[in-house]
Each structure stands twice: as structure tokens, then as C-alpha cells.
Image (tube, rainbow, N blue to C red):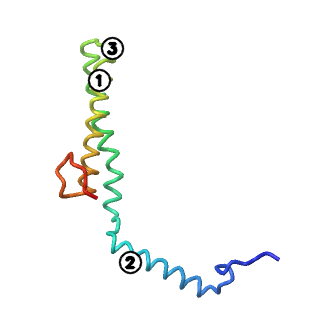
């Protein structure tokens, strides 16, 4: 005969009580550790745009300059790569500030 886990054998009320207790424990932990808010999630998702926008803008400007001066893809690639590096640096600074708001940009957090 197959064994039945205590979770499966428990009446519906007990499983509900267990679920509520686990949620309450998570909520207490979030309050103690500092809950991740919705705006923090949006900020983290927005970090991607911090990288993409300078890269695309650099590539677009370089492509336009390449067409104007007939330099092939040299300026498009160079300015696109420069925009990518600049965007990564900006995202890194933003994450560093989120990690330790008292740190100056470019310094690592003490945690």
C-alpha cells in the first residue's frame, strides 16, 4: 500500500492553517529583512533599459555618421560599443547605490 504524506492526509482546515502560518512567517521575515517592494522590482527591470538605451543611441548616431562620412560600420560599431560600456557602468552604479545608499558611486557596499 502506498504511503500517504501527512500533508495529503491532513484535513482541509489543517492544510489551510499550515498555509496561513507559512505566509505569516514569510511576512514576518520580509518585515525584519526589509521586503522587496513592487517599485524595487520595477527598478530592477528598468536597469536593462539603462544598458540598452545608450547602446542603441550610440549605434544609431554612429550609423548616421557612417552614412554621412562613408566610413562603413566603424563609427556605428564604435559608438554602439561605447554606449554599451556607458550603460553597463550606469547600471552598475545604480545597483551599487541600491545595495548601500551611503556609499559614494564607485565604492562597494560594506555588506
What residue sits right under mark 1 in the picture? 78
- If you read the primary sequence from the N terminus, does the residue marked by circle 3 or circle 2 appear first? 2
Picture coordinates of residue 38, whole percent (x, y) = 34, 63
Q: CA distance from mark 3 to mark 2?
A: 59 Å
- If you read the primary sequence from the N terminus, does the residue marked by circle 2 or circle 1 appear first? 2
Picture coordinates of residue 93, whole percent (x, y) = 24, 47
Q: CA distance from mark 3 to mark 1?
A: 11 Å
Say above or below: 84 vs 90: above
Residue at 28% of width from left, 45% of height from top?
92
Badge 1 marks a residue whose secondary structure is helix
**Disc assigned to residue 52:** none
Q: Residues within 10 Å of mark 2 (few under 14, many from 20)?
A: few
Q: Residues within 10 Å of mark 3 (few under 14, many from 20)?
A: few
What residue sits right under mark 2 in the picture? 28
- 106 vs 55, left or right, is left
Q: Are marks 2 and 1 in contact (CB under 8 Å)?
A: no
Residue at 35% of width from left, 58% of height from top?
41
Amino acid at each position: 500500500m502506498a504511503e500517504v504524506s501527512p500533508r495529503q492526509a491532513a484535513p482541509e482546515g489543517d492544510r489551510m492553517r499550515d498555509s496561513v502560518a507559512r505566509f505569516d512567517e514569510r511576512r514576518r521575515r520580509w518585515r525584519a529583512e526589509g521586503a522587496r517592494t513592487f517599485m524595487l522590482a520595477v527598478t530592477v527591470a528598468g536597469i536593462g533599459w539603462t544598458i540598452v538605451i545608450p547602446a542603441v543611441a550610440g549605434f544609431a548616431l554612429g550609423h548616421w555618421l557612417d552614412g554621412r562620412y562613408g566610413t562603413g560600420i566603424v563609427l556605428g560599431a564604435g559608438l554602439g560599443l561605447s554606449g554599451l560600456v556607458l550603460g553597463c557602468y550606469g547600471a552598475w552604479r545604480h545597483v551599487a547605490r541600491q545595495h548601500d545608499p551611503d556609499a559614494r558611486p564607485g565604492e562597494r557596499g560594506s555588506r
